Amino acid sequence: MTQEIQEIETIFAQEIKNNTKFIMILGTILLVIGLLAMGAPLVAGLSLALMIGVILLLAGIGQLVFAIKTDKGLFNISIALLTLIVGLYMLANPGAALGSLTIFLALYLLISGIFEIMMSLQIRPVKGWGWALFSGIISTMLGAMIWGQYPVSGAWAVGLLIGIRLFFSGWTLLMFGMAAKAVQNNQ
């Protein structure tokens, strides 16, 4: 092992050890949320579309108030109105919004999966790195699957795939936490 790899391993392992309880709690929460989303994928997908609609609506209102109060001109008012319109559209048409989110989800899963694979290879041979690699591979495969089945996948994919992603992310955190706890118990 090179000096740089040893330093990365030491820093990563120390951070896991310092935050074992938090990591295990977060892993459990993500795992449970993932199971719930997998159990009701359409509900999870539509809920996500509605939540994003609400966020955009609130952001648009905030931007509009800012633009009017600061007299920042037509450009800022236009951005605020666009944000409001998209938010209202998503709230009025969550099914169509879900179709758009399907494309973004595929891209998110592909990109985050590739980054997670790269991260896992950087932290190798830290105990638990294989779970991070596995999670990244699963995420990349899910992104490719949803992209390949679009637009049919729009009705079920967002909720199901986010559920699967959350489940494996939670599992990965639990494995890191359990490995750190085992190390702490052996010291």
Image (spheres, rainbow, N blue to C red):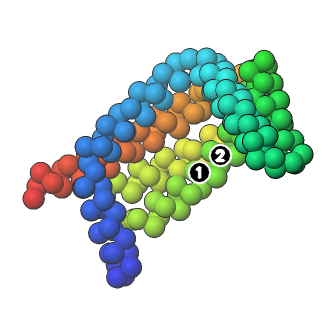
Judge the density around disc 2: few (<14), some (14-19), many (≥20) Cα neighbours within 10 Å.
some
Where is residue 90? Give x, y as percent: 76, 25
Q: Which mark is residue 112?
A: 1
Q: What residue type is labelled 1?
A: Ser
**Residue at image x 56%, y 17%?**
40
Spatial distance from mark 2 to mark 1, Cα to Cα? 6 Å
* Image quadrant where one finds the N terminus: bottom left
**Residue at image x 72%, y 32%?**
61
* Residue for badge 2: 108
User: In this figure, what is the number of numbered marks?
Assistant: 2
Where is residue 14? Give x, y as percent: 27, 62
From this view, report whether residue 30 is shown above or below residue 187: above
- Residue 74 visible in the shown view: yes
From this view, report whether residue 9 is shown above or below residue 85: below
Q: Secondary structure beneath disc 2? A: helix
State left or right for residue 2 relative to residue 72: left
The residue lying furthest to the right in this view is 74
The residue lying furthest to the bottom in this view is 3
Q: Which amino acid does label 2 sit on?
A: Tyr
Where is residue 42? Give x, y as percent: 64, 19
Contact check, label 2 and label 1, Cβ < 8 Å: yes
**Residue at image x 53%, y 24%?**
37
- Find residue 65 and report its image quarter: top right
* Residue toward you, 173 or 66: 66
From this view, report whether residue 133 is shown above or below residue 50: below
